Image (cartoon, rainbow, N blue to C red):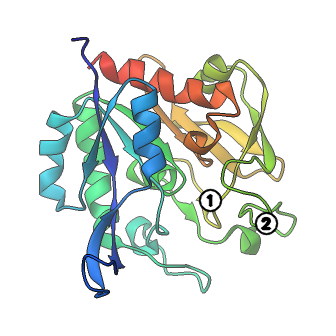
Amino acid sequence: MKHKPLIGLTSTVMSVNTIETQYENVDTIVVYNKFAETVRDAGGVPVVIPLGKPEEAEFYANLCDGFIFTGGEDISAITYGEEPHPKLKKVNKHRDDFEIELVKKAREKEKAILAMCRGYHLLNVSFGGSIIQDVESEFSDSINHFQQSATRTEPTHTVTIEEDSMLYKIIGEKEAAVNSFHHQAIGKVGKGLRVAARAADGVIEALELEDKEKKFLLGTQWHPEELRHENKNMMAIITTFIKEANKS
């Protein structure tokens, strides 16, 4: 049987009630199913990584061939040395700490990384970068970055892609239509990362490694897994990541 790479999907914990629990709220491991579906469609095997302690990160870094850092809560301001903005939403500092260590261990072992939305913010912080805690508070002329007038599978704004970037090499176009579900954004770019795309209002929409010889690493503000059926370029992001993970 052809080898398929194991792809670790980060997750969070939510209090959920179901028929099985007799409508009692219980802490439940949560990750959007679209991430798992997309990994399978691209030729990988999804593995859900439960929220853990930082010292457990090395185990998962050894186990998996690549990692998708998924969406979820805001990044805690404490994680990057700031005080919380009044519009900061739900955070999970334990998740921040665990995933930052997972990024570190995955990079040490040269595993491929794809990060989206919250995961994209976490990636930047793990490289020493910072977060804009509320886009509308920072940018008086910002576009709408949290779409409510369209489904998750519909793009609502465009991004301009740097022509000398890895992302451009994957997509092959200077402009892409993307979906958008965030009120935080990238502030100071982490050391060793470079901007690969921006929105019309200047918000940074994608990051990648400055050193193109290093193992695959890409972060997008948008969710390509939601757009993949309507846009082959979004699926190309996923398949390129899976191919790079398979080299591990």
Badge 1, how many Cα within 10 Å: few under 14, some, many 20+? Answer: many
Height in image: 179 above or below 26?
A: above
Separation of marks 2 and 1 at Cα, in angstroms: 11 Å
Secondary element under disc 1, as helix, strand or loop, is strand
Asked which quadrant contains residue 43, the reply is: top left
Q: Find residue 136 and report its horizontal and vertical position in percent.
A: 75, 71
Q: Relative to 217, is 2 on the left or the right?
A: left
Which residue is labeled 1 in the image?
Answer: 185
Q: Nearer the viewer, residue 78 or 231?
A: 231
Q: Earlier in the sequence, mark 2 or mark 1?
A: 2
Badge 2, how many Cα within 10 Å: few under 14, some, many 20+? Answer: few
Q: Find residue 52 and report its horizontal and vertical position in percent.
A: 19, 61
Q: Are marks 2 and 1 in contact (CB under 8 Å)?
A: no
Which residue is labeled 2 in the image?
Answer: 139
Q: Relative to 242, is 196 on the left or the right?
A: right
In the rendered image, the residue lying farthest to the top is: 2
Q: Find residue 41 and report its horizontal and vertical position in percent.
A: 45, 29
What label does residue 97 carry, if any?
none
Query: Which residue is at a point 61% across and 34% down the rendered structure image?
Result: 228
Height in image: 130 above or below 62?
A: below
Q: Relative to 93, is 136 on the left or the right?
A: right
Q: Find residue 47 and report its horizontal and vertical position in percent.
A: 26, 42
Asked which quadrant contains residue 220, the reply is: top right
- Give the position of the N terminus as an image quadrant: top left
- Give the position of the C terminus as an image quadrant: top left
Residue type, numbered disc 2: Phe
Q: Nearer the viewer, residue 151 or 180?
A: 151
Secondary element under disc 2, as helix, strand or loop, is loop
Residue type, numbered disc 1: Ala
Q: Nearer the viewer, residue 14 or 54?
A: 14
Query: Which residue is at a point 18% across and 43% down the rendered structure image?
Result: 60
